[in-house]
Image (tube, rainbow, N blue to C red):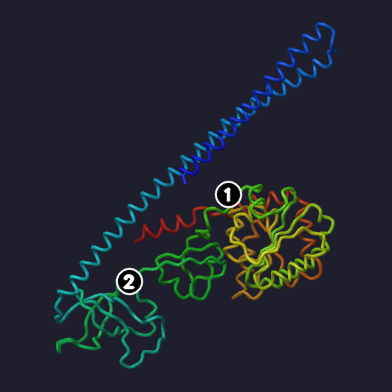
């Protein structure tokens, strides 16, 4: 990448230099012409106004030369800056790779040590060990006769055991806790009840939504750490303290300039973009609301264009819905270049999945959110309210989008540039650009 960037920078710099040469040639020509006309003026062959015109043209040519020289300097500076950034990223990547290889080497050594222990250990009673695995999952679980509840490793040797613990205390079993184990298949007659310590594998949870799902609620109490995308989520965790990390998104989001995004998507360079993100799930209701709302946007049809991601199953129908509407509309079933979509959009109309909201914050795009009404536990409505209460978006229920309501809301928002700018600022406040790094740092610190 560095070599390609260097070549590109050199090519652009050479092009800029050629522009300087052309500007200088034009300046020389204009200077020569000015001298010639001044001589003609002295002899009375041409009027003074014509000489003044030539003098003005020479000044313009001088300005063009200066601008060309400045362009060369700026191009060189941009190239050097980008090259330095790439080299720094490469250095960081090499350091990370070295650290990862070191960790893998340590883990391989540890595994080899455990394997030697398994091969060499002899089993004698009484004995203590660690639980490698357990089938216990929740309080009140029904245990079948003879069912293996855990795998014990005394001195590195594996054999099946039963973990005896009262049913109402199963959910309280934690790493390092003492437990009583009964061997289900004794290798020798001396075995009876064995003391052991539960050695479960530590785990971490991340819940992106403002309302925790069932799995998160069940597992939160035993997790080393619970990370959440919205602070509102903590209320549903049954007293477990969570860390508000935000939801990780791709690093390249929010970096594409509008001109580049419009060109990449094949959109008109001077028309404002409304992006409708129907997605694959629940797209039908949003698609229909948008088509109904076109009537309210008629006055803006010459200044607007619509980028509509309708879902693969609905794209053709939506495309036909725009025919004859007077709008420049690009309809796709799916787009894997969302950085371009967000970069081009003046306003986004979307569902309220946690990932979408994190992307909107990262790209700082004003939004109209229409939560998917069939989402489990109506979590999209909770997401939308948590995001919008800070002013980054407005929320409307799908059931309230009768007639041209959605189009009216878009028209109102497009007519209020100050409000859109305020929404961008509120979105920026919610962005967590280092969410993935923060989560990894906390996990590394605990492990």
Looking at the image, which residue is at 84% across and 12% down?
46
The C terminus lies in which quarter of the figure? bottom left
Q: Position of residue 64 (x, y in %)?
A: 67, 27
Secondary structure at badge 1 equals loop
Q: Residues within 10 Å of mark 1 (few under 14, many from 20)?
A: few
Name the residue carrying label 2: 175
x and y, in percent, of residue 142 in the image: 39, 89
Which residue is identified by label 1?
255
Depth check: give the residue in front, 302 or 324: 324
Dot 2 or dot 1, earlier in sequence: 2
Residue positioned 60% across, 62% down in the render? 356
Left or right side of 162 for 423 = right
Question: How would you rate the neighbour count of disc 2 (Cα within 10 Å): few for under 14, some for 14-19, many for 20 or more?
Answer: some
> For the point 33% across and 80% down, which residue is it?
134
Where, by quadrant of the figure, is residue 39 drawn? top right
Seen from the viewer's position, the closer of residues 263 and 295 is 263
Q: Classify residue 70 by image quadrant.
A: top right
Is residue 434 positioned above or below 381 on the image? above
For residue 308, above or below residue 72: below
Q: CA distance from mark 2 to mark 1?
A: 44 Å
Please give left or right for residue 17 compared with residue 63 in the image.
left
Residue occupying the far bottom of the picture: 145
- In this picture, residue 122 sits left or right of residue 376: left
On the image, the x and y values in percent for residue 408 come to 80, 61
| Mark 2 secondary-structure assignment | loop
Q: Please tell me the numbered disc located at residue 281.
A: none
Q: Position of residue 277 (x, y in %)?
A: 66, 64
- Foreground label between 2 and 1: 1
Image: 381 above or below 2: below
Q: Quadrant of residue 103?
A: bottom left
């Amino acid at each position: 990448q560095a070599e390609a960037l260097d070549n590109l920078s050199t090519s652009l710099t050479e092009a800029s230099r050629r522009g300087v040469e052309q500007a200088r040639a034009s300046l020389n020509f204009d200077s020569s012409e000015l001298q010639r006309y001044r001589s003609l003026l002295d002899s009375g062959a041409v009027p003074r106004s014509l000489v003044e015109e030539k003098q003005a043209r020479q000044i313009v040519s001088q300005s063009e030369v200066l601008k060309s020289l400045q362009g060369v300097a700026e191009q060189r500076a941009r190239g050097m800056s980008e090259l330095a950034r790439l080299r720094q990223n490469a250095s960081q990547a090499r350091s990370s790779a070295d650290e990862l290889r070191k960790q893998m080497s340590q883990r391989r050594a540890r595994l080899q040590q455990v394997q030697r222990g398994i091969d060499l250990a002899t089993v004698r009673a009484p004995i203590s060990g660690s639980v490698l695995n357990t089938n216990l999952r929740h309080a009140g679980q029904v245990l079948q006769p003879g069912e293996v509840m855990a795998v014990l490793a005394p001195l590195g040797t594996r054999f099946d055991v039963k973990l005896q613990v009262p049913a109402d205390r199963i959910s309280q079993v934690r790493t390092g806790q003492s437990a009583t184990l009964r061997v289900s298949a004794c290798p020798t007659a001396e075995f009876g009840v064995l003391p052991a310590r539960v050695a479960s594998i530590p785990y971490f949870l991340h819940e992106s939504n403002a309302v925790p799902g069932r799995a998160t609620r069940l597992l939160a109490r035993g997790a080393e750490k619970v990370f959440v995308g919205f602070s509102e989520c903590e209320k549903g965790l049954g007293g477990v303290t969570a860390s508000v990390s935000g939801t990780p998104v791709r690093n390249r989001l929010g970096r594409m300039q509008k001109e580049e995004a419009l060109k990449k998507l094949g959109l008109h360079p001077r028309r404002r973009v409304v992006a409708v993100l129907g997605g694959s799930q629940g797209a039908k209701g949003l698609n229909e609301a948008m088509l109904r709302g076109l009537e309210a946007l008629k006055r803006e049809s010459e200044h607007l264009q619509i980028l509509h991601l309708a879902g693969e199953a609905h794209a053709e129908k939506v495309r036909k819905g725009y025919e004859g509407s007077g709008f420049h509309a690009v309809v796709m079933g799916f787009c894997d270049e969302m950085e371009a979509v967000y970069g081009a959009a003046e306003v986004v109309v979307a569902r309220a999945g946690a990932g979408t909201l994190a992307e909107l914050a990262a790209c700082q795009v004003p939004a109209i959110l229409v939560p998917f009404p069939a989402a489990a536990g109506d979590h999209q409505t909770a997401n939308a309210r948590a995001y919008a209460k800070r002013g980054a978006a407005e929320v409307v229920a799908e059931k309230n989008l009768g007639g041209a309501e959605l189009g009216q809301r878009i028209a109102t928002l497009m007519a209020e540039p100050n409000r859109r700018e305020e929404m961008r600022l509120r979105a920026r406040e919610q962005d967590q650009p280092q969410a993935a790094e923060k989560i990894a740092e906390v996990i590394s610190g605990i492990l």
